[in-house]
Image (cartoon, grey):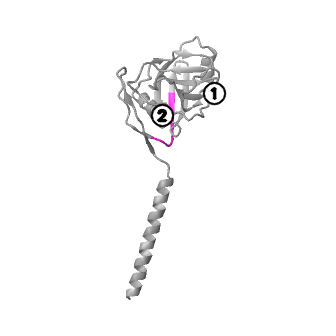
Amino acid sequence: MRHWKRIVAVVLVAAVALILEGWAASAQAAPTLFKTCTYTRVGDGTVRPPYSLAPTIGLVKVTVRTNRGDLVLTLDRHGAPCAVHSFTYLALKRFYDQTPCPRRTRAILECGAGRPGYRFTPELTGHEAYSHGVVALSNEGGSGSRFFLVHTANGVPKNSTVIGAVSNGLPVLDRIAASPQQPVKVLSVLVG
């Protein structure tokens, strides 16, 4: 009878060891769900920085309502989690509501005004592609509060963090680019 108990004990210990080993291996292979971002306060803004933990997976739908029509954006957290986290945080704080789009060229539509009160390091991969419909944050000293939508790749500010793309509303962007003299104003930015 003792011999039987030893065999059961050895089998149980081996099974537990295999389960723990498999769990440890899958935990190492699993993607990181959050990234710790560094948002540094600066004295020239009105908004406190967001929490430092930014989700790294998933897409975020954002609707930018302008006086010229709506633009639906799909933001990708994987490529630039801190930038997407900051953008959605500012949108939820209504930072972009009733702000102008001061830079309108045939290449880009840049929107947003002021500084939020914090800055962070741009998230650049070195493989940024600024094609028609891409959404990126302007690289203005790391504040990341202004964003732009690309109409044509010629004349796009390089070294800007790409956060997503226009998923619905490209005809609106095309109409805005065709008449850069007409003012564009962001009425609201809705997340979700």
Residue 142 is situated, as x and y percent measured from the top left of the image, at: 46, 26
Towards the viewer: 131 or 60: 131
Query: Which residue is at a point 47% across and 32% down the rendered structure image?
Result: 83
- The reply to whether the magenta stretch includes residue 48 is no
Please give left or right for residue 130 compared with residue 29 in the image: right
- Of the residues under marks 2 and 1, which one precedes in the sequence? 2
Question: Could you tell me how many numbered marks the image carries?
Answer: 2
Which residue is identified by label 2?
84
* Residue receiving disc 1: 132
Which residue shows up at 57% across the image and 22% down it?
A: 157
Question: Quick one: label 2, few (<14), some, or many (20+) residues within 10 Å?
Answer: many
Tell me the quarter of the image containing the N terminus. Answer: bottom left
- Residue beneath the point at 63% across and 27% down: 132
Q: Which contiguous range is marked in magenta?
A: 55-63
Residue 11 picture location, percent across and down: 44, 76
- Along the line of sight, which residue is nearer the eye, 147 or 143? 143
